[in-house]
Image (tube, rainbow, N blue to C red):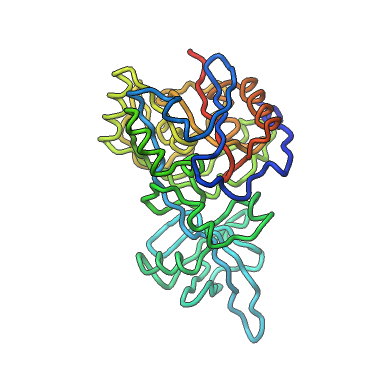
Amino acid sequence: MRVDQFDFELPEDLIALRPASPRDSARLLVVSPDGSLSHHLVRDLPSLLENGDALVLNDTKVISARLRGVRAGRGDTMPKIEIMLHRRTAPNSFLAFARPARKLAEGNMLILGEGLIARVKQVLDAGEVEVRFDLSGATLDAAIASQGEVPLPPYIAGKRKWDERDRADYQTVFAAHEGSVAAPTAGLHFTPELLAALAARGISRETVTLHVGAGTFLPVSAEDTSGHHMHPEWASVGAETATRLNATRAAGGHIVAAGTTSLRTLESAATHGAIAPFSGETDIFITPGYRFKAVDVLLTNFHLPRSTLFMLVSAFCGLEVMRRAYAEAIRERYRFYSYGDACLLFPAAA
């Protein structure tokens, strides 16, 4: 499909720069199977789902992946450098995007904070480098956590500076496994009170893991969806989780994915009409025409024009339905993107 079919006009003042407080007070646009739209709050979720459904959350944890420092040089020549870690390659090595990458060469020393030194292992394409730190393992992780910044998406970082509030705001309350450079943003809406209300309603809670990579920020530059390739990301579905989710479906319950990362993980694990244990990389790219195998309902934020995520929701509910839903959200001044409001999508029956 042509990428421009997924374009739409979005007023800049609808881009949320801070999350709703409390988190579950965010607005929620519900798209019903018949395509009708209704307006709610995220805290209404228990009444919108059914007893026996299973809610699937991505329990990845965002690391403080943006590091600022200097490239060591001779005399007073110490150019400023910024790197964003996005994929671990060894206990002491990461792939990272560097700015400005043109100033880096193999062997360069980078001073990225107090006691945090890395060397450029190799320079790759498109501003990407591999760096090797002098520290390793848990010691390195602690140093990155103390010296780094939460890597806010470019559409927020371009409008305001990162601050300490983001360290908590840009993390879900159920985050458990470090590895992401971006939050699973639908999960940001959940509070302990909302999770308790869902449990009281008889909605079970399951977790999967997908470590969100920097590719989530990259625009689709191809003119046709067939020319775009996703960056691989590591994902996991445990054996017991798969068994319980299959039992939910067998009993007539729905699998509700909280976020596109949970959905992509489950669809990567789906095989022969069931969800199987899964651990490995996925580069699944979902566009209209895709046949969903594992997910019945999707909770997700409002996404960028021409993005792979808007393509995914258009595959889930239909392009025309989602164009109409987004037009309604813009008319009603819903807040968009990572810190914005959400929609709950029920696709039409097959």
Name the one closer to the observer, 303 or 72: 303
Vertical placement of residue 263 versus 34, above or below? below
Residue at 40% over, 49% down? 175
| Residue beneath the point at 43% across and 23% down | 296
Q: Quadrant of residue 247?
A: top left
Please state if 324 lies on the left or on the right of 85 as rendered: right
Looking at the rendered image, the quarter that the N terminus falls into is top right
Percent position of residue 33, x then y:
52, 16
Q: Nearer the viewer, residue 165 or 326?
A: 165
Residue toward you, 119 or 145: 145
Describe residue 57's horizontal placement relative to residue 225 as left or right: left
The image shows residue 134, relative to residue 11, as above or below, that is below
Residue 109, horizontal then vertical, whole percent? 54, 74
Report x, y in % for residue 251: 29, 18
- Which of the 4 image quarters holds residue 140? bottom left
Relative side of 59 to 98, left or right: left
Q: Residue at x 58, y 78 (%)?
A: 72
Say above or below: 265 vs 291.
Answer: below
289 above or below 86?
A: above
**Residue that extends furthest to the bottom in the rendered view of this protein:** 75
* Residue at image location 52% in from the left, 74% down from the top: 113
